[in-house]
């Protein structure tokens, strides 16, 4: 019996019936078929589906809540600032409509922008305030009726641009065809919910014009109707307008709370005051705490990652971050290096153009079993992408890239003969513009990247190592201070939860990254159902699996920016 052929045939049948397995990395083995593990259907994690979007967007509105609200966890909160006379103390849009304003900008841009923000002292207070908000894990954005083309250079000039996930001017509202900021906020929340089924739990909206807030509950004076203007802490919830959508089956609506904070001119001042900043910082909450070091007790369960995480999670958390923040990142901050991350494409071609960026990362499993034609097709496609740097590592499915184990794996997974492993590796190494990392590093504009294909052993695939010291030996090779680490397998507790409820991540990798390497980002794949991003309070962990557990390339690339340590960020 040809086990490899039987396996590939079984995989084809499984795809047709859309069943899934519960094994730790979603890879199907003949043993899974025999043991009936393919009978469990993938539970849906989405509470809000893409098909709900248009119906919900057209029928959504903000309904006032009678009591002043509070924000949920900062990591699931969106903080949105107006620009003119909120972040700035001068109305820059109006200033630049005058000949005097244009002259000031032309003569001394640095001085002009500093004055717009209220001078050096206020700029420093604003910078400290934004850093404090960012440290909580909140997503920070700007929504203005002004022009993006004027706002973006102003922020870049004073060193504030990198604090904002997205800057939206009047152009964004026109493109979205919405009337007013409240409608734009509702649309943003719905788009975020499409990305991961949850989106943002709360929005804090800070603006100097009360007309930009949703309407509050009507009141009356001596029988005459009166609309109450929003006060600080006024709260609304996103809801479906009565009669909206199909009455028999109304569209789903994510649970989102909007908290308003009028400031600046409508409070008798010019932009956010020091008192505003202090009160808002308290409202948003404390910075994310750095993870508590992993104790020795966890390592007694190194071969049982599910139990190991039960021990580790008593001391530190894996905090989910909104997927929308990574799939729709907005314009890149000046001086930053933009990374576009994909993984586990399994010989699928991603439809449509990939997001723009400086570096395209692939975290392995670009093929099904690493046949030469699969490697060649991927190398050609990857090389053709427009990103100026393209970095890839191998994964457990890329059998021919692991020459040391290929003499055992080639027949197990259906290769009719033993292909030339060195030639397959050369296809990647010699592809134009492609950098293949295998326990090696590269540098892009001052940002260091390290890539490794290894993962704890699973099913006799490529690049498998026993848990514990064999894995740890590989992780010790990662240079301390590396900015972005790529491994095919995830760390324990972050992007490693399988549909079976088991964990698949590596305890030693988590420990090594937290204690010694301390990267800003860790990128992986391997566990398809772990797609998304989390943080431990210090490191952002990205599972960029493109394929779902059903091996459909439905997950969007995840994008993030890294500002080199050598670049002044204010």
Image: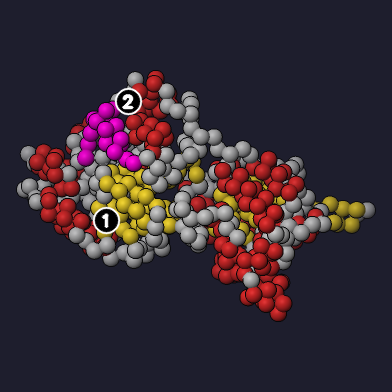
**Gap in angstroms between the C-alphas marked 1 and 2:** 33 Å
Q: Nearer the viewer, residue 268 or 493?
A: 268
Residue at horizontal 48 percent and vertical 55 percent from the top? 567
* The N terminus: image quadrant: top left
**Relative height, residue 370 to residue 412 (above, below):** below
Q: Nearer the viewer, residue 171 or 356?
A: 356
Q: Is residue 471 magenta?
A: yes
Q: Which percent across, then down, holds residue 13?
A: 22, 46
Q: Is residue 313 left or right of residue 175?
A: left
Local secondary structure at mark 2: loop
* The C terminus: image quadrant: bottom right
Q: Nearer the viewer, residue 348 or 491?
A: 491
Query: Looking at the image, what colour scheme do you see?
Result: secondary structure
Q: Which percent across, then down, holds residue 437?
A: 26, 49
Local secondary structure at mark 1: strand
Marks 1, 2: nearer the viewer: 1
| Picture quadrant where residue 529 is located | top left
**Relative height, residue 120 to residue 535 (above, below):** below
Nearer-N-terminus badge (1/2): 2
Residue at horizontal 71 percent and vertical 79 percent from the top? 99
Q: Is residue 94 left or right of residue 327?
A: right
For residue 302, the mark is: 2
Residue at horizontal 71 percent and vertical 44 percent from the top? 278
Residue at horizontal 93 percent and vertical 53 percent from the top? 222
Label 1 neighbour load within 10 Å: few <14, some 14-19, many 20+: some
For residue 60, the mark is: none
Q: Which percent across, then down, holds residue 52?
A: 51, 54
Tag 1 residue: 435
Specify the segment rendered in magenta: 463-479
Q: Is residue 161 magenta?
A: no
Label 2 neighbour load within 10 Å: few <14, some 14-19, many 20+: some
């Amino acid at each position: 019996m040809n086990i490899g052929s039987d396996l590939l045939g079984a995989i084809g049948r499984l795809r047709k019936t859309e069943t899934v397995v519960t094994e730790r990395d979603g890879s199907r083995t003949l043993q899974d078929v025999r043991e009936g593990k393919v009978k469990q259907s993938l539970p849906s994690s989405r509470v809000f589906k893409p098909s709900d979007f248009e119906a919900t967007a057209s029928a959504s509105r903000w309904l006032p809540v009678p009591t002043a609200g509070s924000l949920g966890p900062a990591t699931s909160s969106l903080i949105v600032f107006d620009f003119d006379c909120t972040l700035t103390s001068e109305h820059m849009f109006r200033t630049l409509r005058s000949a005097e304003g244009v002259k000031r900008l032309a003569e001394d841009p640095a001085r002009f922008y500093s004055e717009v923000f209220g001078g050096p002292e206020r700029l420093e207070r604003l910078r400290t305030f934004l850093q404090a908000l960012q440290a909580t894990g909140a997503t920070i954005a700007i929504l203005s009726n002004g022009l993006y083309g004027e706002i973006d250079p102003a922020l870049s000039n004073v060193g504030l641009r990198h604090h904002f996930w997205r800057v939206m001017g009047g152009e964004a509202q026109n493109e979205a065809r919405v009337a007013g900021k409240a409608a734009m906020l509702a649309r943003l929340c719905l788009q975020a919910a499409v990305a991961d089924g949850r989106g943002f739990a709360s929005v804090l909206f800070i603006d100097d014009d009360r007309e930009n807030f949703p309407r509050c509950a009507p009141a009356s004076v001596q029988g005459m109707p009166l609309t109450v203007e929003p006060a600080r802490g006024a709260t609304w919830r996103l809801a479906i307008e009565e009669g909206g959508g199909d009455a028999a089956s109304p569209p789903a609506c994510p649970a989102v709370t909007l908290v308003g904070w009028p400031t600046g001119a409508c409070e008798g001042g010019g932009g956010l005051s020091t008192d505003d900043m202090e009160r808002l910082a308290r409202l948003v909450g404390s910075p994310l705490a750095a993870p508590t070091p992993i104790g020795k007790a966890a390592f007694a369960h190194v071969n049982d990652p599910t139990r190991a995480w039960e021990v580790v999670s008593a001391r530190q958390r894996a905090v989910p971050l909104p997927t929308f923040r990574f799939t729709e990142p907005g314009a890149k901050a000046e001086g930053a290096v933009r990374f576009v991350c994909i993984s586990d494409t399994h010989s699928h071609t991603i439809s449509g153009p990939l997001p723009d960026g400086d570096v395209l990362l692939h975290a392995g499993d670009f093929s099904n079993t690493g046949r030469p034609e699969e490697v060649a097709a991927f190398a050609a496609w990857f090389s053709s992408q427009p990103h100026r740097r393209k970095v890839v590592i191998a994964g457990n499915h890329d059998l021919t890239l692991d020459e040391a184990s290929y003499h055992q794996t080639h027949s197990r997974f259906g290769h009719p003969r033993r292909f030339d492993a060195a030639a397959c590796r050369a296809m990647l190494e010699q592809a134009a513009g492609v950098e293949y990392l295998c326990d090696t590093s590269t540098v892009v504009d001052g940002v260091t990247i390290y890539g490794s294909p290894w993962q704890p052993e699973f099913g006799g695939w490529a690049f498998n190592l026993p848990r514990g010291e064999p894995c740890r030996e590989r992780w010790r090779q990662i240079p301390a201070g590396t900015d972005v680490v790529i491994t095919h397998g995830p760390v324990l507790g972050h992007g490693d939860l399988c549909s079976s409820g088991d964990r698949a991540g590596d305890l030693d990798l988590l420990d090594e990254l937290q204690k010694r390497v301390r990267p800003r980002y860790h990128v992986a794949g391997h566990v398809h159902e772990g797609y998304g991003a989390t943080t431990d309070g210090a490191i952002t962990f990205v599972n960029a699996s493109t394929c779902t557990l059903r091996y459909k390339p439905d997950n969007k690339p995840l994008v993030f920016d890294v500002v080199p340590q050598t670049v002044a960020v204010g």
